[in-house]
Image (cartoon, grey):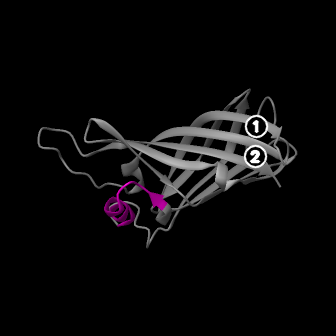
Amino acid sequence: MSAVTEQQIPSGTWTLDPIHSSASFAVKHMVVSTFRGRFENFDAKLDVAEDGSATLTGTVDADSIVVKDPNLAGHLKAPDFFDVERHPELRFEAHDLRRDGDEILVNGELTIKGHTNPLEARGTIAGPHQNIADKTTLGLAFETVIDRTKYGLEWNAPLPKGGFALSNEVTLLVELELSKA
């Protein structure tokens, strides 16, 4: 395990405030636009030891995907994409978090549809800070780009004049508000 460097996050367990957190994705669609979606049900926990070593774990209910079209949501839940009946959960686990001022680098493993691959995400960290309810809170915002085909999300369709319906590169955006337990 690597320690959180520079300004250490206070030790203890930090739990998710789901109301003030989000997990979303963006993918190039039909070569010309960016399609966005999100997951409504997810959880995250940050455990920081006295020595500064930290573990960040997160799970996402694949069936909670939200997009603007119910038919598309059904397709995304089907075997072509997330196959939620056989793979109901997406999972992330990191044991390497490095803080440098307001920036944070996280290395871990992401599992989607039974495929686990290493992942590096960069972002920002805010806090710790006392909120209006006098709870100690911490904000983490991460972004990374994955190749969806490495996770078994291989569906695509060729376009008549070249290119494909979907890019293989998908941007993942996670914003977490965590409270010290």
> Is any part of residue 9 visible from this angle?
no
The spot of residue 93 in percent (x, y) is 63, 53
The reply to whether discs 2 and 1 touch (Cβ–Cβ < 8 Å) is yes
Q: Residue at x 31, y 63 (%)?
A: 71
Q: Is residue 21 magenta?
A: no
Specify the farthest residue to the top. Answer: 101
Q: Which residue is drawn at 45% across and 62% down?
A: 113
Q: Quadrant of the C terminus?
A: bottom right
The spot of residue 81 in percent (x, y) is 36, 60
User: Does residue 14 sit above or below 2 in this rendering?
Assistant: below
Specify the farthest residue to the left. Answer: 160
Looking at the picture, which amino acid does disc 1 mark? Answer: Val
Question: Along the horizontal axis of the image, is 152 left or right of 135?
Answer: left
Q: Is mark 2 on a helix, strand or loop?
A: strand
Residue position for label 1: 4
The spot of residue 130 in percent (x, y) is 84, 41
Residue position for label 2: 54
Q: What span is in magenta?
A: 65-78
Q: Which circle's residue, 2 or 1, is located before the other in the chain?
A: 1
Depth order, front residue of 33/7: 33
The number of callouts visible is: 2
